[in-house]
Image: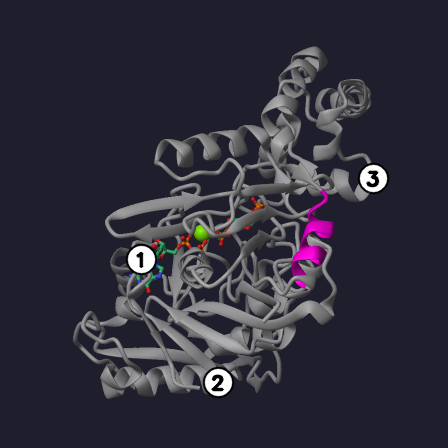
Amino acid sequence: MPVQIILGAQWGDEGKGKVVDMLAQHADIVARYQGGANAGHTVCIGEKQYVLHLLPSGMFHEQCTCVIGNGVVIDPNALMDEIAQLEAAGITVHGRLLISHNAHLIMPYHKQLDVIREQTGTRIGTTGRGIGPAYIDKFMRVGIRIVDLLDRDTLARKLKQNIEEKNQILTKVYGETRIDVDAIISEYQEFDKQIDEYITDTSFYLHQALRQGKRIIAEGAQGALLDVDHGTYPFVTSSNPTSGGACTGLGIPPTSVSEVIGVAKAYCTRVGEGPFPTELDDATGERLRTVGHEFGATTGRPRRCGWYDAVAMQYSSHVNGIQKLVITKLDVLNEFETVRICIGYEFHGKRLRSFPTDVATLDHITPVYEEFEGWKRSLAGATTYEELPLQARTYLEALARHTDAPLWLASVGPRRDQSIVLPS
Ligand code: GDP
Ligand code: IMO
Ligand code: MG
């Protein structure tokens, strides 16, 4: 069992944190492969709740080494805060965290540009964490990487070059004031001492671990429908949360991947702008939001809610190659009289054969639903699949069939033990 990829199969916030934490008890390494502090992965242990933004969700298992891969964009301030918070809560980070020397840094001007672009261009509803602008610099080949923090002169030179250009954009395009180069140089030069102990060639480390037969979990952030290539562009994030992103984001070969696990909610949510075919702008949507506590773990924004979209999920299953489907938050539907699954899209009176990723089409499709009887009882006591009410099993089976992915785990609460693994 070399590399298991665990990824979000919808628009993020599917419960990846819970699932990664749960599976990390049997893992040696948990490695994040893309995104940045735009992620908010919740892990509940007993009564305690932790929200991780950059640190992998394997932090709560002492035997796990946690890796932040080259595909992640790192805000050193956010990272240091998170490390301090975990250490204060009694979780040892020192000696258990490795950061890729090739990961790119998020700079204050990335966050500033992220916010300005949201106000002046197409509003995506970003998290404002500087993600897009940092990936722009990476692909423009002017980005500043973690390794640059270790050489003060190189860091100062690269920052000067970058800020010179950013100042032109800020003042001439957006009418903003100039950024103070020296303040940023001295702020970032201070990170070398704090971050040095964690920096390494993580791709090399993972290859060695693979050779030693270590068990590795590759943890995705966001979700497949937010993928910059395969999602609902332009209403996406700027990285590849889909399974292919795990290889590029960690520097591991596709041949090392043994399993792709897709995590989805028993319904759908989305934060920010962009098409959402099954969105419920009514009392049912409000009920899903209230019962499911659907408010962002990073920004606190209310999440848009709707029925499970099997058309989008089938697409996600095919793009990612989902071999095991995890359905979370089944318990949120406990008291619903009826529950629905979107099994098709109609566009201008015609049934579409596949998920359209272009926004113009998605905005005008009519979902076709299949309705199921609700189970109207708590799932709290259920520990095996057989103990789930027949209506819940019928719903899960239909959902997996329409998704074209084998159902593997049903989650019925935020804690590790509130999980039902299905017989294979
Ligand atoms: P992630 O970004 O995919 O890790 O998901 P988030 O942490 O942003 O959001 C998922 C939320 O649902 C968190 O508050 C979890 O504690 C919670 N959660 C996860 N699984 C379940 C479940 O099966 N039932 C309920 N009620 N809550 C869950
Ligand atoms: P986790 O890992 C849900 C969304 C934002 C916005 C779009 C682009 O917790 O599932 P960005 O800041 O990335 O440039 O914003 O992507 N988004 C998420 N939505 N969960 C996330 O992370 C998200 N990270 C980004 O709301 O629509
Ligand atoms: Mg989240």
Q: Secondary structure at mark 1?
A: helix
Mark 1 or mark 3, earlier in chain: 3
Q: Residues under labels 1 and 3: Cα distance?
A: 41 Å
Q: Quadrant of residue 301?
A: top left
In the picture provided, is 128 more to the left or to the right than 101?
Answer: left
Q: Is residue 415 left or right of residue 305?
A: left
Q: Is residue 315 left or right of residue 284?
A: right
Q: Measured from the top left, where is residue 187 in percent x and y?
A: 62, 17
Q: Vertical placement of 391 versus 72: above or below?
A: below
Quadrant where the N terminus is found in the figure: bottom right
Bounds of the magenta segment: 201-210
| Label 2 residue SS | helix
The residue tagged 2 is 402
Q: Residue at x 40, y 72 (%)?
A: 327
Q: How many marks?
A: 3
Magenta stretch: includes residue 23: no
149 w.r.t. 267: above or below: above
- Left or right relative to 108: residue 201: right
Q: Are marks 1 and 3 in contact (CB under 8 Å)?
A: no
- Give yes or no for residue 205 being in the magenta stretch: yes
Q: Give the residue number, with chain letter if any, for mark 3.
A: 141
Q: Pick the residue in front: 374 or 319.
A: 319
Q: Please, what is the three-letter code of the amino acid marked with disc 3?
A: Arg
